[in-house]
Amino acid sequence: MEPLSYDIIIIGGGAAGFFTAINAAEMAPEARICILERGKELLTKVRISGGGRCNVTHAEFLPKELTRNYPRGEKELRGPFHSFMTGDTIEWFEKRGVPLKIEEDGRMFPESNSSETIIDLFLEESKRLNIEVLTKRAVQGLKQKDGRWEVTTLQENFTAEKVLVATGSNPKMWEMLKDLGHTVVPGVPSLFTFKITDARIKDLPGVATDAVVRVKREKLETSGPLLITHWGMSGPAILKLSAWGARELSDRKNFEIEVNWLPEFSPEEISEELQRLKKENAKQHPQNYAQFGLPKRLWQSLVNASGIGAEVRWADLNKQQLEELTNQLGCGTFQVHGKSTFKEEFVTAGGVELKEVNFKTFESKVCKNLFLAGEVLNIDAITGGFNFQNAWTGGFLAAKAMTTDSVA
């Protein structure tokens, strides 16, 4: 059978793939563009992102600050973000009838609060721009011959002048890229929560407060809201820690973390404050009144863990109890005995080695006219819309490069 011929083939029908295709079709209306998706559904990650609301991007408008949310890719994305970043993303969607809104924590969602709005937009734009979208087309082979790319699937064979790979953390595609000469950093999970069985938090699911969390014996420390769950700990502080420590923690099921429930206080300041409370609230029972602005149930649990019963008054506290309460508040140790993927936010640290990519164009330095965007690269971010922003930026710059005759 004669192979089907296109100008641009995009492998992967996810966020980066569709964004690239739509921009390329707008920049070069005459170009024949095809998206090949291995599954039967398109944009599955977009559908489940942000609890079904699609966390499109994050309200951070300085490139350097934005890059600080990428444990892998921080340095490489600085240049691309100067060309296309948050403001451009907002404008891109608004121009196409999808206004975005900013939430208190900086995350940005479509005003409709539904990921279907984003999916519908991508599908409608693809149709309007005559982009061919083929599902159930798992790529079996990818090679370059006589200046053109040959793409093999079980159903048909294709050829194209340019190919963009946007398959996320797909091990089969990583293997094909390795066969083409690329180096691939093995994938490990990122963005996970901690399984912790501990009497201090057993009855506190749903309690949230700001904290500093540190992995003991590692140079890993983050701060932010910490959420106590039925299985242990989650929330931004834990998720950031899991992203930055994805490699270090990849093969460790058991490790210890240290939690400072009072991030604005040093241990010395906590100790001084407890001494003041002992003096000024002598007749009160520590169990009865939460201090330091902590949630009451958490305060009571930490007081209890310090060996201070409900009948004890501040005046009765001895040196050992005060020291133990200082430790519980400022540097409590918790044993982590497992990790859980964060909801449906599947993020993997790993992918194509970043030195092998030209970040002005997202073209491979190993293979001419091969482009890479999204999580197929060794780029990943903390939660909050940053992974999608990487997809939009890479897709836009790749589209621009693929539709320009002379690529820099």
Image: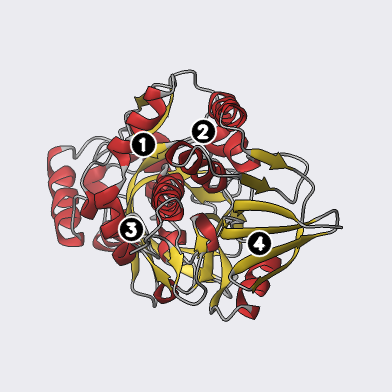
- Asked whether the residues under the numbered discs 3 and 1 touch, taking CB atoms below 8 Å apart as contact, a structural biologist would say no
Q: CA distance from mark 4 to mark 3?
A: 29 Å
Q: Which mark is residue 54?
A: 2
Quarter of the image for residue 173 reads: bottom right
The residue labelled by disc 3 is 222
**Residue kind at label 2, given as amino acid type:** Cys
Residue 293, quarter of the rendered image: top left
Which circle, 2 or 1, is nearer the viewer? 1
Q: Nearer the viewer, residue 234 or 333?
A: 234
**Residue 213 rendering spot, x and y as whole percentages:** 36, 58
How far is disc 4 from disc 1 in space, using C-alphas? Answer: 26 Å
Q: Nearer the viewer, mark 4 or mark 3?
A: 4
Would you say 207 lies left or right of 330 here?
Answer: right
Q: Amino acid at mark 4?
A: Asn
The N terminus, quarter of image: bottom right
Which of pointers 2 and 1 lies earlier in the amino acid sequence? 2
What residue sits right under mark 4 in the picture?
170
Tag 4–tag 1 contact (CB < 8 Å): no
Q: Which color scheme is applied?
A: secondary structure
- At x 13%, y 54%, the residue is 272
Determine whether, in the image, residue 240 is placed left or right of residue 254: left
Q: Secondary structure at mark 1?
A: helix
Disc 3 residue type (three-letter): Thr
Find disc 1 in the rendering and name its residue: 89
Q: Is residue 73 above or below residue 130?
A: below
Q: Residues within 10 Å of mark 4 (few under 14, many from 20)?
A: some
Whole-angstrom CA distance, mark 3 to mark 1, is: 28 Å
Q: Is residue 203 left or right of residue 238?
A: right
